[in-house]
């Protein structure tokens, strides 16, 4: 079972178009579907679920659609945060909030504050987020540390940079899912997805329910994650872990 699942929730607009509905109807249906996926992830014991809700490139969409998305975000936070809290879900939002309306920024702060000490699933919403923005922010911070004399250039390693990324306290995603038929990661968690297993599906996001999620988890479970090693090395390490587990249990 993956510890951390990251999802690009694609296909809301096409789902609506197929039903001769306005695009915002697809976004509303997509928000409703988040509730299903959060419940599934929590029941499966997944530690973190990160959802790409609004990219830094999405500002290029028609202004009316952007405004409706902002309104939908506020409404979803206000309606769902108490339920998340009751189920011990911890909510976090990553991305540049400075461009959001004041009301949305206030709703985010309230939701994060209410759920901060919860110990169940961590639900991360990536909003006005971009992977390149995330890496640049980390690099800018480290450059400032070097300029202040607190670090040297040789102190800047991949591991240190990783600690400066958004949600750096969480494990990197093990499984990346994209609905909607596209086969790219679209500037989402570029550094963090370096070794994630990728899963693409034609299913549009509002239709991506429990059965589709279980299928993605099953695909993940069938793969061998080698991290640069050979398959035989991974199998040998797995066998050693099982042996150690058997010994510790006697």
Image (cartoon, rainbow, N blue to C red):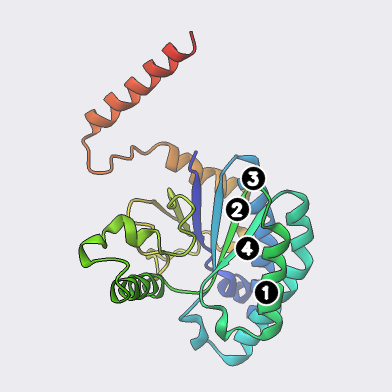
Mark 2 or 4: in front is: 2
- 3D distance between C-alphas at marks 4 and 1: 16 Å
Which label number is shown at residue 73?
1
Q: Residue at x 48, y 39 (%)?
A: 218
**Residue 165 percent coordinates (x, y):** 42, 64
Query: Closer to the N terminus: mark 3 or mark 1?
Result: 3
Residue most extreme to the top: 250
For label 4, the residue is: 206
Q: CA distance from mark 2 to mark 4?
A: 22 Å
Between discs 2 and 3, the one toward the N terminus: 3
Q: Residue furthest bottom?
A: 63
Q: Judging from the image, what secondary structure is the residue with disc 2 in?
A: strand
In the rendered view, does 138 fall on the left or right side of 108? Answer: left
Marks 3 and 1 in Cβ contact (< 8 Å): no
The numbered dot on residue 42 is 3
Q: Secondary structure at mark 1?
A: helix
């Amino acid at each position: 079972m993956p510890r951390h699942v990251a999802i690009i929730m694609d296909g809301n607009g096409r789902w609506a178009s197929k039903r001769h509905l306005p695009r915002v109807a697809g976004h509303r249906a997509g928000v409703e579907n988040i509730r299903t996926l959060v419940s599934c992830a929590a029941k499966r014991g997944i530690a973190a679920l990160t959802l790409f809700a609004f990219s830094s490139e999405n500002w290029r969409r028609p202004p009316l659609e952007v405004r409706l998305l902002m309104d939908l975000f506020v409404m979803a936070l206000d309606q769902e945060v108490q339920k998340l809290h009751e189920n011990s879900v911890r909510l976090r939002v990553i991305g540049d909030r400075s461009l959001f309306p004041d009301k949305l920024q206030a709703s985010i702060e309230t939701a994060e504050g209410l759920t901060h000490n919860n110990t169940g699933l961590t639900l991360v919403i990536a909003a006005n987020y971009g992977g390149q923005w995330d890496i640049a922010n980390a690099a800018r911070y480290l450059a400032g540390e070097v300029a202040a004399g607190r670090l040297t250039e040789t102190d800047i390693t991949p591991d240190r940079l990783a600690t400066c990324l958004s949600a750096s306290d969480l494990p990197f995603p093990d499984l990346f899912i994209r609905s909607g038929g596209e086969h790219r990661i679209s500037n989402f968690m570029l550094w963090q997805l370096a070794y994630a297993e990728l899963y693409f599906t034609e299913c549009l996001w509002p239709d991506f329910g429990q059965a589709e999620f279980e299928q993605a988890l099953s695909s993940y479970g069938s793969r061998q994650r080698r991290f640069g090693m050979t398959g035989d090395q991974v199998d040998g390490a797995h066998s050693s872990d099982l042996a150690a587990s058997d010994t510790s249990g006697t």
